[in-house]
């Protein structure tokens, strides 16, 4: 089968953060364009977007051995089942499911959203889900989908791959889930895994599965206590996840109930959070998510209805660094008994505490500022609400999702220096923001702690410091201007996506996150296509200024 990548050239990227680095250097602007247009394939990059070589080796092993079109690794066997079922489940679908783990997932789905899928006899089903290995040609009709779930890989995978669309199995060596794909659904399934954040850590692929020991338990306990203390709450309110997106995904899922099926999103959100809120309600037959991008308080008051499950926002937003008056938003929401999720990854607990304003759920991508070294992937979900804790615990247990023990070890080490690192980042970013704001080659700077920023009043109210993220638009913004500037940026600035590292990272954020969005959509959400985003590190601030100033000399 030919894919859109068949003619692409594999490019060996230099990772930022070492062997397990979560970003990659794009030396020139054209490299980014070629990547977005699928003319090159990266061997390294952000793990949810670019499969790490360790995972790729395992996927290729299964793909070749069992003659699959494609293979995907998932964080756990259970999460692989969840992902595959979630892919096929949509409003009105008719399923045949025999007893077993898949049936437990079916019961979970139907409890959350009753009557949107139907369990029927095998001959009436759109999708057949079975763990029976005696596959026969008469088992399914031409238009039926057959999903086989087996814990132990067998030769049946090869013998009947012409009948089977999906096989889910358990790689017990690394305790991961394997999805063998024999149907033409590869790109959609890859996107689904990315949005839900269920990809395994590369470190998980280095260590064969062993029983959890006392040392690992103590490290987990220490990390949860450390993160909880930063957010001014208790250790038992903290849940560790394999990625920031899985924490966001579970936060959203935890609030859905039979009577609460609609979300409201405030401000600009991370692209994968947007995709979750766009896609999942539609396929479940729920109410579409309402996206509010201005007049937040007024529009929210007019928009909350009895079926509103939750409100989600980032503080500040990415990439425009908008601030929303959380105290007022939470007050409006709670009067209508609606929960509020705050993604506080960018602000960090050094600068802001959402629980001070009665937020219900706080999520962080620990990959970013909390770790600060660009060499870890993980996420946390924190809640003081007893009922939400029960729902999150149930889904975590069902999907067997947790931060990998090796990632816990790395984060536990790096988070020790979090406060000092953030103090330096705050100081540097404020100086760089002022430098850019006064530079004649800069059209606009987005940084809430500048006095001329429309968010300055809220920054003074809520933030101890501006954190490390700054976005800016170049004068005469165009492809040529962006290319000249980007190509002339030198050390210590590294040219790669991601944020929150102690190393300064620059990327043309909109080009990378919204490349295929129309001009109308970008205008609607207030994004210049060539907007630059810089995540300030702890290097000497004069060196960062020097690099930016030198690059700006090359544009007119």
Image: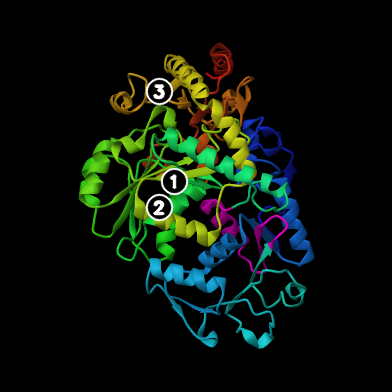
Query: In this rendering, does residue 506 appear at all?
Result: yes
Task: Identify the magenta region.
Answer: 171-198
Earlier residue among tags 2 and 1: 1
Q: Which residue corresponds to the image point at 57% horizontal and 79% vertical from the top-left? A: 144
Q: Badge 3, how many Cα within 10 Å: few under 14, some, many 20+? A: many
Q: Which residue is mark 2?
A: 389
Q: Which residue is mark 1?
A: 236
Are dots 2 and 1 in contact, CB under 8 Å?
Answer: yes
Vertical comparison of 264 with 127: above or below: above
Earlier residue among tags 1 and 3: 1
Q: Nearer the viewer's eye, disc 3 or disc 2? A: 2
Classify residue 70 as left or right of residue 325.
right
**Snapshot quadrant of residue 351:** top left
Q: Nearer the viewer, residue 388 or 283?
A: 388
Are dots 3 and 2 in contact, CB under 8 Å?
Answer: no
The CA span between labels 3 and 2 is 30 Å
Mark linked to residue 331: none
Q: Position of residue 8 (x, y in %)?
A: 71, 48
**Magenta highlight on residue 342:** no
Are dots 1 and 3 in contact, CB under 8 Å?
Answer: no
User: Which element is circle 1 on?
Assistant: helix
Q: Position of residue 423 (x, y in %)?
A: 47, 20
Q: Nearer the viewer, residue 165 or 500?
A: 500
Q: Badge 1, how many Cα within 10 Å: few under 14, some, many 20+? A: some
Q: Quadrant of the N terminus?
A: bottom right
Q: Which residue is mark 3?
A: 465
């Amino acid at each position: 089968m030919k894919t859109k990548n068949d003619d692409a050239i594999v490019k060996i990227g230099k990772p930022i953060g070492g062997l397990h680095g979560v970003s990659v250097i794009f030396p020139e602007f054209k490299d980014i364009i070629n990547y977005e247009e699928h003319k090159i394939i990266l061997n390294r990059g952000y793990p949810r977007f670019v499969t790490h070589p360790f995972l790729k080796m395992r996927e290729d092993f299964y793909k070749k051995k069992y003659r699959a079109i494609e293979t995907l690794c998932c964080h756990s066997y259970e999460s692989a089942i969840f992902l595959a079922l979630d892919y096929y489940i949509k409003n009105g679908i008719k399923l045949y499911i025999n007893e077993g783990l898949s049936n437990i997932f079916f019961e979970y789905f139907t409890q959350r959203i009753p009557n949107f899928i139907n369990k029927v006899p095998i001959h009436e089903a759109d999708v057949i889900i079975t763990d029976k290995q005696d596959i026969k040609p008469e088992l399914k009709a031409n238009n039926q989908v057959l999903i086989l779930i087996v814990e132990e890989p067998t030769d049946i995978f090869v013998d009947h791959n012409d009948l089977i669309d999906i096989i889910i199995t358990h790689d017990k060596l690394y305790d991961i889930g394997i999805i063998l794909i024999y149907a033409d659904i590869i790109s959609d399934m890859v996107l689904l895994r990315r949005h839900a954040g269920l990809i395994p850590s590369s470190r998980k692929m280095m260590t064969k599965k062993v029983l959890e020991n006392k040392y690992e338990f103590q490290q987990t306990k220490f990390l949860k206590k450390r993160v909880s203390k930063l957010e001014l709450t208790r250790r038992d309110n903290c849940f560790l996840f394999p990625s920031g997106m899985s924490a966001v995904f579970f936060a959203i899922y935890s609030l859905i109930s039979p009577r609460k099926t609609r979300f409201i999103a405030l401000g600009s959100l991370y692209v994968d959070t947007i995709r979750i809120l766009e896609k999942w309600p539609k396929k479940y037959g729920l109410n579409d998510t309402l996206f509010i991008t201005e007049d937040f308080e007024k529009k929210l008051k007019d928009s909350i209805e009895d079926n509103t499950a939750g409100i989600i926002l980032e503080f500040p937003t990415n990439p425009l660094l908008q601030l929303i008056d959380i105290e007022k938003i939470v007050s409006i929401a709670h009067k209508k008994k609606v929960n509020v999720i705050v993604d506080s990854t960018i602000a960090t607990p050094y600068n802001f505490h959402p629980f001070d304003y009665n937020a219900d759920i706080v999520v962080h991508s620990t990959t970013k500022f909390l770790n600060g070294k660009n060499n870890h992937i993980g996420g946390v979900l924190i809640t003081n609400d007893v009922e939400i804790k029960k729902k999150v615990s149930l889904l975590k247990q069902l999907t067997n999702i947790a931060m990998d023990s090796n990632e816990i070890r790395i984060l536990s080490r790096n988070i020790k220096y979090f406060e000092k690192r953030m103090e330096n980042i705050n100081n540097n970013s404020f100086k760089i923001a002022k430098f850019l704001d006064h530079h004649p080659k800069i059209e606009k700077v987005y940084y809430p702690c500048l006095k001329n920023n429309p968010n300055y009043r809220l920054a003074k109210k809520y933030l101890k410091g501006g954190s490390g993220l700054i976005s800016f638009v170049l004068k005469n913004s165009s492809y040529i201007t962006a290319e000249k500037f980007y190509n002339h940026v030198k050390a210590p600035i590294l040219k790669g996506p991601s944020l929150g590292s102690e190393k300064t990272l620059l990327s043309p954020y909109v080009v990378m996150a919204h490349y295929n969005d129309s001009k109308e959509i970008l205008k609607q959400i207030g994004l210049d296509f060539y907007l630059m985003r810089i995540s300030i590190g702890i290097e000497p601030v004069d060196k960062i200024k020097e690099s930016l100033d030198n690059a700006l000399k090359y544009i007119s």
